[in-house]
């Protein structure tokens, strides 16, 4: 009786310690994409409510960043559409998704800070979501580790080419 646990992992070596970290980072990236989709859709709805009726939101106290509520509505609609598109790009794994996600999450955090007097609780929640998205996208190294795995495998296992010497060059032999 042989057990599956007695067999070494493929490749003959111990599993890499970074594999578990990559799984967490990849999950965080997926969650960040979903959060961006949801936050973008909610931003669009907030913007529509602000554009439709100027009396939906009431300013709490006096604040430095004073805009007309209709202007805030359009800012939320445009930013919400962009956040939804980038969130979709992150979920699809596009190359531009992470960089644009970090940039848009940063802009979103700043906009939510200026939106504080209108909806303080939701603005704080959106700021927290934006900070998580920035963290998740900046800590995900799955693309880099995939490339380094391929490079490590190629460097660790040089194979002679047909019709060539042992190390890939005509007439070379092992040192």
Image (cartoon, helix red, strand yellow):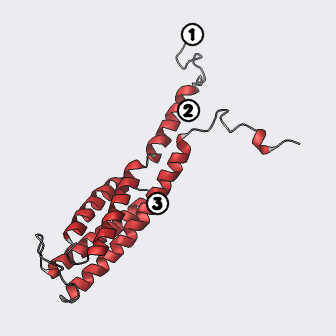
Q: CA distance from mark 3 to mark 1?
A: 47 Å
Residue ID for mark 2: 153
Q: CA distance from mark 1 to mark 2?
A: 20 Å
- Quadrant in the picture for residue 57: bottom left
Using the image, determine if residue 59 lies above or below residue 173. Answer: below
Which of disc 1 and disc 3 is earlier in sequence? 3
Residue ID for mark 3: 30
- Of residues 112 and 72, the one nearer the viewer is 112
- Of residues 148 and 76, the one nearer the viewer is 76
Using the image, determine if residue 23 lies above or below residue 118. Answer: above
- Quadrant in the picture for residue 94: bottom left
User: Which corner quadrant holds the C terminus?
Assistant: top right
Residue ID for mark 1: 175
- Quadrant in the picture for residue 160: top right
From the image, state whether disc 3 or disc 2 is nearer to you: 3
Element under disc 1 = loop
Residue at the spot x=27%, y=59% of the render? 106
Residue 48 rendering spot, x and y as whole percentages:
26, 83
Residue 102 rendering spot, x and y as whole percentages:
32, 56
């Amino acid at each position: 009786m042989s057990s599956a646990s007695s067999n070494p992992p493929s490749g003959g070596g111990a599993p890499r310690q970074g594999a578990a970290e990559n799984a967490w980072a990849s999950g965080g990236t997926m969650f960040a994409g979903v959060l961006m989709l949801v936050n973008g859709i909610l931003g669009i709805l907030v913007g529509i409510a602000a554009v439709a009726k100027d009396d939906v939101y009431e300013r709490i106290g006096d604040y430095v960043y004073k805009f007309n509520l209709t202007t805030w509505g359009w800012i939320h609609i445009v930013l919400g559409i962009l956040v939804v598109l980038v969130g979709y790009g992150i979920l699809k794994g596009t190359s531009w998704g992470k960089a644009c996600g970090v940039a848009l999450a940063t802009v979103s955090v700043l906009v939510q800070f200026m939106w504080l007097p209108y909806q303080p609780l939701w603005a704080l929640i959106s700021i927290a979501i934006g900070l998580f998205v920035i963290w998740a996208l900046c800590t995900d190294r799955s693309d880099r580790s995939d490339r380094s795995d391929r490079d490590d495998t190629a460097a660790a296992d040089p194979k002679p080419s047909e019709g060539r010497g042992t190390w890939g060059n005509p007439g070379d032999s092992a040192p």
